[in-house]
Image (cartoon, helix red, strand yellow):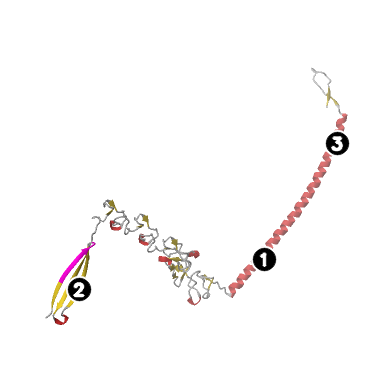
């Protein structure tokens, strides 16, 4: 019958103890076999602050405020991890503005993920034109009004959709029967064979149904009968003839009036010249007569001198 006998012994040095256990197997199939087990046990001394929110040799210096769970290095006071929004050894630097959820790495401040519309290590680079969303991975629809690009954050067309498109992202085409900006206009309904109008302009590219005209087929075509057409032609001819006759008569009247006015003007000039000649002759005669009448005798009253010479 097998039985075990165990003996232990050990020694310590440098703060560690080595325990040797000898197990002897007596009897049975393992008669007189020996197993030796060595166990090394060292003395472990742990020193630190009783509170986790302080550090220093005297454990009297508070950890930085932004250290997560107020835990810092027992000697240097450096934060093991920062609260959200800050980074650095002492968590005293702000994370970049465009970090998603305001989270960045404690060591260097790089963003874990960028907000939609931004890219780069520190999320300072705006998406290039035509792209938007998280990591600028989504492409704009290309249907924004006047060829403008979409919003780099949301992908929406801030100025609205181009003609023929609708929806917040301008990816929905106008339904048949509507056209224009935001699809608010209705087609005329008179396109050839009830075909839909063009969703940008409303034009009927395939033509109009009978009785309609214009690019949008919105005007009715007026068809006159032969009798009406003939009557209209006669009316037009009469009007033109009347206008021409009026012009000719007016011209003749003006011509006659001009000739008559000119004749009167000539007669007036001749009469004026004749009167001037007669008047001039009379003046000359009067002047000659006055040359011989230098003196004239006047009849004065008795109280005054009876005769007086007067020069005229």
Q: Please give the label number shown on residue 36.
A: 2
Could one spot residue 25 in this view of the protein?
yes
**Does residue 304 appear to the left or right of 226 in the view shown?**
right
**What residue do we see at 76% from left, 53% from top?**
260
Label 2 to label 3: alpha-carbon separation: 182 Å
Q: Which of 54 and 267 is in front in this view?
A: 54
Other residues around mark 2 within 10 Å, as few (<14) / some (14–19) / many (≥20): few
Tally the marks.
Answer: 3
Figure quadrant of residue 173: bottom left
Using the image, determine if residue 138 lies above or below residue 288: below
Other residues around mark 3 within 10 Å, as few (<14) / some (14–19) / many (≥20): few
Label 3 to label 1: alpha-carbon separation: 66 Å
- In the rendering, at what x and y percent does residue 187 appear? 48, 70
Return the residue at label 1. 241
Q: Which of 129 and 97 is in front in this view?
A: 97
- In the rendering, at what x and y percent does residue 280 appear? 83, 39
Which range is magenta? 7-14
Secondary structure beneath label 2: strand
Of badges 2 and 3, nearer the viewer stands 2
**Does residue 76 appear to the left or right of 132 in the view shown?**
left
Label 1 to label 2: alpha-carbon separation: 144 Å
Q: Does the magenta stretch include residue 107?
A: no
Q: Which mark is first along the chain, 1 or 3?
A: 1
Query: Cβ–Cβ below 8 Å for labels 1 and 2?
Result: no
Q: Nearer the viewer, residue 72 or 111?
A: 72
Return the residue at label 3. 284
Figure quadrant of residue 75: bottom left
Secondary structure beneath label 3: helix
Q: Is residue 10 magenta?
A: yes
Q: Main secondary structure of the magenta part?
A: strand
- In the rendering, at what x and y percent does residue 76 appear? 32, 55
Q: Name the quadrant of the N terminus.
A: bottom left
């Amino acid at each position: 019958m097998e039985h075990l006998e165990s003996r232990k012994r050990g020694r310590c040095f440098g703060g560690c103890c080595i325990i040797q256990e000898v197990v002897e197997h007596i009897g049975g199939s393992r008669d007189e076999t020996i197993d030796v087990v060595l166990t090394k046990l060292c003395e472990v001394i742990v020193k630190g602050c009783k509170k986790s929110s302080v550090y220093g040799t005297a454990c009297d210096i508070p950890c930085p405020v932004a250290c997560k769970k107020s835990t810092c290095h027992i000697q240097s006071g450096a934060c093991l991890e920062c609260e959200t929004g800050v980074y650095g050894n002492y968590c005293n630097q702000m994370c970049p503005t465009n970090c998603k959820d305001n989270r960045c790495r404690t060591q260097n401040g790089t963003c874990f993920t960028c907000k939609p519309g931004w890219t780069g290590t520190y999320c300072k680079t705006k998406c290039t034109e035509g792209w938007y969303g998280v990591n600028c991975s989504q492409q704009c629809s290309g249907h924004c009004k006047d060829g403008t690009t979409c919003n780099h954050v949301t992908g929406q067309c801030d100025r609205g959709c181009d003609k023929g498109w609708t929806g917040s992202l301008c990816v929905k085409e106008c339904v048949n029967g509507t056209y224009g900006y935001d699809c608010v206009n209705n087609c005329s309904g008179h396109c050839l064979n009830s075909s839909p109008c063009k969703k940008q302009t409303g034009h009927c590219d395939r033509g109009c149904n009978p009785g309609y005209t214009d690019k949008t087929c919105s005007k009715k075509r007026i068809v006159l009968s032969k009798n009406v057409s003939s009557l209209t032609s006669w009316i037009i001819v009469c009007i033109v003839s009347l206008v021409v006759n009026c012009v000719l008569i007016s011209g003749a009247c003006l011509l006659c009036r001009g000739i008559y006015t000119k004749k009167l003007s000539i007669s007036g000039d001749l009469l004026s010249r004749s009167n001037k000649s007669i008047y001039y002759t009379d003046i000359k005669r009067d002047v000659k007569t006055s040359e011989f009448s230098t003196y004239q005798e006047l009849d004065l009253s008795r109280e005054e001198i009876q005769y007086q010479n007067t020069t005229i």
